[in-house]
Amino acid sequence: VRFAPSPTGALHIGGVRTALYNYLFAKQHNGDMILRIEDTDSQRFVPGAEAYIIEALEWLGIKFDEGVGYGGNHAPYRQSERKDIYRKYVEQLLSDGKAYIAFDTPEELEAKRKEIPNFQYDASTRMQMRNSLTLPKEEIDRLIAEGKQYVVRFKVEPGEDVHVNDLIRGEVIINSSILDDKVLYKSADNLPTYHLANIVDDHLMEITHVVRGNEYLSSAPKYNRIYEAFGWDIPVYVHCPLITDETHQKLSKRCGHSSYEDLLDQGFVSEAIINYVALLGWSPSDNREIFTLDELVHVFDYHHINKSPAVFDIAKLRWMNGEYIKKMDADEFYERALPYMKEVLKKDYNFKKIAGMVQTRIETFPDIPALIDFFEEVPEYDSAMYCHKKMKTNEETSLTVLKEVLPVLEEQEDYTNDPLFETLSAFVKEHGYKNGYVMWPLRTAVSGKQMTPAGATEIMEIIGKDETIKRVKAAIEKLSK
C-alpha cells in the first residue's frame, strides 16, 4: 500500500485517516507501506509542507517501510524527481494511439464552454478541437518546434462499460461515454498530471491495494482505462467514506479542526487523534471505543468500514482526549501542562501540585488557564454564589461562618492541606456545623468560582496564608454590604 500526500499545506484529517487505514491494512497482512510525495502541481506547492507532513505522521506513530526519508528499492519517491520515467510512458501511449497531443489555449477552451452547454473534452467534441487527431502532422511538428505549449490527453473510447471493483462498495459500473479525455501531461512544466503519475508509480512500486478517500471513487474508471491501455493489473480499491462536519457538510478548513495542525493547536494528544480518526468510518465488532495503535492493528477489519459519511464530532474527540490525559504519566502531564499554567500564573506556585489538581478535570490542555486563573487573582463574582441549597448556605449564613473562621485561619501556622483540613474539621465539630456549611463559603471566598479543580484547603495551601486571609476578609466585606 502507499500513502501519497501532496505538499500543499497542513495534513487534513482525511489524509490522517487514509494514512492510518493504509498502515493498519499493511500491518495486518504483513505488507509494506510506501510514503510517496505527489508534488507534480508546482503552482500549489508549499515550501516546508513535505517536512511537516512527515513529522506529523511520525508523531502520530505511523511508520513507513520505504519512501521519502526512508529509502527503498523503488526510489526516487518524489514525483518531481521522476520526470524521465513519466515521459517514457507518455510516449508509449502516444505511439500506441491511446493518447494525443492537444494545443487548445485556455481562451479557446473557454469559448467552447460558452458555445456548448456542459462541455467536456471527449469523444463527442475532440474532433472540433486543435489536436493531433485533427491537425496535419506537419503542423503538429511545426507547433512543437516553435515551442507552443501543449498537453497530452488520454483517448477514451465511448460506449464501453468500465468495471470498478471496490472492497467496500462492491462492483461499480460506469459507461465510458461520460468520461472526459483527461490531461496526462503538460509541456509547460514538463510534468505529468496526477492521473498519469499516480498510475505509473503505483504500477512500478508494485502497489497491490489502494486505500483512499471516497472522493477518488469517481476517478477510478478513468484510472482503470489507463491501466488497461498499458496492459497492467489494476490494484484492489478500498474507498473510505467521506468525513463531514456536524452539519453534514464536507469537513472543510473553515470548521477549525479539519487538519492535524488544528488539533495540535487545540491541545489534543496524538494517541487520542489516532484513536478517534480510526473510528471515523470504521467500527469494531463490539462497542469498545478506546484503542492504542498496536491494538488497532489487531482489531481493524476493512469489512467493518462503512459506506455512509462519517461525522466528525469535536465533542466526542474532546471526551476521548480527556480519557487519554487522565491516564497520562504525571511527569509527562506536568511537562506538557506547564506552559499553559504559566500563561495565567505569574507568581511562584507549586506547579506540580496544581498539575495534579487539573489532570483529571480537563479534556484538552488549553482548558487549563480558565480552570486555574483564580489562583493569581479572585475574579469578580456575584455574592449569590454563596447560596447553596444542598449545603444549606446563603449570604447571611456564609457571612457568619467566615467571620467565625477568620480568627482560626489567622492563628493557623501550617498551611499545608492536611493540617488545615484537621483545623477546619475541628472548627466544624466544635460549632456543630455540617462540613459543607463551612467549606462552601470558604472555597467561594478564596476562589470566586463555583467550579474549582480542588477543595478549599488545597486552594489555600497553593495561595498561602497571607493571600487566604486577604481573600476571606474581602469576602466578609463583600457580604457585609
Image (tube, helix red, strand yellow):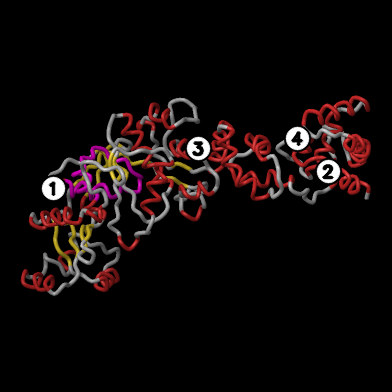
Q: Is residue 181 visible?
A: no
Marks 2 and 4, Cα distance to the nearest angstrom?
Answer: 15 Å
- Residue at point 11% right, 72% down? 145
Mark 3 vs mark 1, foreground winner is 3
Side of 252 where 325 appears, left or right:
right
Mark 2 vs mark 4, foreground winner is 2
Q: Is residue 322 visible?
A: yes
Circle 1 crowding by C-alpha within 10 Å: few under 14, some 14–19, many from 20: some
Marks 3 and 2, Cα distance to the nearest angstrom?
Answer: 42 Å
Element at label 4 = helix
Marks 3 and 4, Cα distance to the nearest angstrom?
Answer: 30 Å
* Residue indicated by mark 4: 458
Element at label 1 = helix
Amino acid type, residue under disc 2 in the picture: Asp
Q: Quadrant of residue 400?
A: top right
The image shows residue 284, relative to residue 341, as above or below, that is: above
Q: Position of residue 159 (x, y in %)?
A: 17, 51
Mark 3 vs mark 2, foreground winner is 2
| N-term mark: 1 or 4 | 1
Marks 1 and 4, Cα distance to the nearest angstrom?
Answer: 73 Å
35 and 340: which is toward the camera: 340
Q: Magenta region: which residues? A: 198-227
Side of 334 where 306 appears, left or right:
left
Q: Are marks 3 and 2 in contact (CB under 8 Å)?
A: no
Marks 2 and 1, Cα distance to the nearest angstrom?
Answer: 83 Å
| N-term mark: 2 or 4 | 4
Element at label 3 = helix
* Residue indicated by mark 2: 466
- Residue at point 79% right, 40% down? 464
Q: Are marks 3 and 4 in contact (CB under 8 Å)?
A: no
* Residue indicated by mark 1: 230
Side of 326 where 58 appears, left or right:
left
